[in-house]
Amino acid sequence: MPIIVNLDVIMAKRKISSGELGEKVGISQANLSILKTGKAKAIRFSTLEAICKALDCQPGDILEFKEQDLK
């Protein structure tokens, strides 16, 4: 998938655990793990907004687009 999730990088920079972020955002650690590993197929804007507020970041800090090489 060409969308890269850098949530773990931002969490490390902010020194926040999955449990703490999950509590602030209101999502389970299981769902947070799915998002962190890039296995999520979608994310609600309300969840993305809550994550950005909790981590004091922009959506582009968390999500990145990389073109896939078709060769």
Image (cartoon, rainbow, N blue to C red):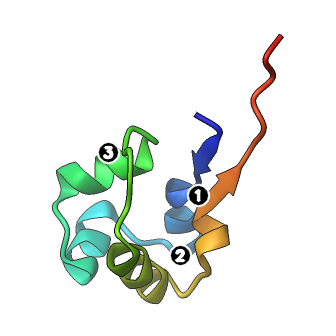
Binning the other alpha carbons within 10 Å of mark 1 as few (below 14), some (14 to 19) or many (20 upward) gives: few
The crowd level at tag 2 (other Cα within 10 Å; few <14, some 14-19, many 20+) is few
Amino acid type at mark 2: Arg
User: What residue do we see at 33% from left, 74% from top?
Assistant: 47
Q: Three-letter amino acid code at disc 3?
A: Ile
Question: Is tag 1's residue or tag 3's residue first in the polypeptide sequence?
Answer: 1
Residue bearing mark 3: 34
The kind of residue on which mark 1 rests is Val
The Cα–Cα distance between marks 2 and 3, rounded to whole angstroms, is 20 Å
Locate residue 66, reporting x and y percent: 75, 43
Of residue 43 and residue 54, the one placed in the foreground of this image is: 43
Can you give x and y, in whole percent of width and height, for residue 22 in the image?
A: 24, 70
Q: Are marks 2 and 1 in contact (CB under 8 Å)?
A: no
Q: Quadrant of the C terminus?
A: top right
Q: Which quarter of the figure is the N terminus placed in?
A: top right
Front position among marks 2 and 3: 3
Of labels 1 and 3, the one closer to you: 3
Which label's residue is closer to the chain start, 2 or 3?
Answer: 2
Q: What SS does tag 2 mark?
A: helix
Q: Which residue is mark 2?
A: 14
Q: Report the Cα–Cα distance between label 1 and label 3.
A: 15 Å
| Of the image marks 2 and 1, the number of the one nearer the N terminus | 1
Q: Is residue 62 above or below residue 45?
A: above
Q: Residues within 10 Å of mark 3 (few under 14, many from 20)?
A: few
State left or right for residue 4 relative to residue 70.
left
Image spot of residue 9 (x, y percent): 58, 58
Q: Position of residue 7 (x, y in %)?
A: 51, 59
Secondary element type, mark 3:
helix
Mark number, residue 9: 1
